[in-house]
Image (cartoon, rainbow, N blue to C red):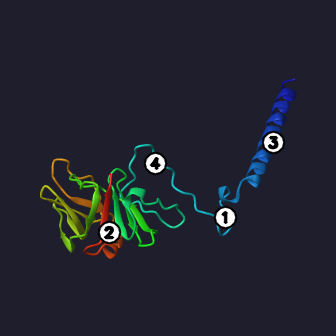
Amino acid sequence: MARSSSGFVAGLTAAALAAVGFLAYQASATAPADLRGGKAGASSAEPSAPPSAPGASPAPGASASTGQQVPAAPEQSGSGERVVYALAERRVWLVEESGEVSRTFTVMPSTVHPAPGSYKVTSRSGNVQGSDGVQVEHVVRFASVDGVTIGFSAAVDGSTPSPDPTRRTGGVRMSREDGDALWKFATVNAKVVVVP
């Protein structure tokens, strides 16, 4: 009796495994191509990054790239060619005369912030020491708050750490790649719009 019951259990186990295998095959055969590791077609979009948690700030240097939806520039930023800096979003947009966003990326704000409004690039420096003592490049200055000059820049070592909250600094930091793009876009007298 023991032999027949163990044979019966072995038979049931084999049948269950076969059924699970068949169902797994059916599921993979009906799944969309992109979930099976293939491409549904040449025009399929790459999967986008998961959305940030509410209230979370994206990492500095996260740029919108091909295949991802480019966040639109804030409506209150006006029109025409301009650099838009959103304080709350910690994001910069490079906007062409046509209104098309040519690039957007996140930044690490300074400890001193410019008031919302419209500014012009006042000066630029290729390579200097920042107000925090870090060597920076592609400095684009556009505002001054209580003696602290505010400008965009990238650390030569590529770092974007949070600024020391005990120091009054005006450097809005970005990745070196984004700094290169902003440097080419924002010449002296270029419009910079700061939004809340």
User: How packed is label 4: few (under 14 Cα within 10 Å), some, or many (20 or more)?
Assistant: few
Q: Earlier in the sequence, mark 4 or mark 1?
A: 1
Circles 3, 2 touching at the beta carbon (< 8 Å):
no
Circles 2, 4 touching at the beta carbon (< 8 Å):
no
Above or below 56: residue 140:
below
Q: Earlier in the sequence, mark 1 or mark 2?
A: 1
Gap in Å between the C-alphas at discs 1 and 2? 34 Å
Q: Looking at the image, which is closer to me, 32 or 66?
A: 66
Q: Looking at the image, which is closer to me, 100 or 155?
A: 100
Give, as a three-letter code, the residue at label 2: Gly
- Residue where numbered disc 3 is placed: 19
Assign a secondary structure to mark 1. Answer: loop
Circles 3, 4 touching at the beta carbon (< 8 Å):
no
Above or below 55: residue 137:
below
Q: Earlier in the sequence, mark 3 or mark 2?
A: 3
Gap in Å between the C-alphas at discs 3 and 4? 40 Å
Gap in Å between the C-alphas at discs 4 and 1? 26 Å
- Residue 131 x, y percent position in the rendering: 16, 61
Give, as a three-letter code, the residue at label 3: Ala
- Residue where numbered disc 2 is placed: 179
Q: Is residue 159 visible?
A: no
The image quadrant where one finds the N terminus is top right
- Residue 83 x, y percent position in the rendering: 34, 66
Horizontally, residue 125 falls left or right of residue 186, namely left
Q: Earlier in the sequence, mark 2 or mark 4?
A: 4
Horizontally, residue 51 falls left or right of residue 3, namely left
Residue 52 is labelled as 4
Instruction: Please identify the quarter of the rendering in which residue 33 is found.
Output: bottom right
User: How packed is label 2: few (under 14 Cα within 10 Å), some, or many (20 or more)?
Assistant: many
Gap in Å between the C-alphas at discs 3 and 2? 57 Å
Task: Please name which of the two marks, 3 or 2, marks the residue nearer to the observer.
Answer: 2
Horizontally, residue 74 falls left or right of residue 173, namely right
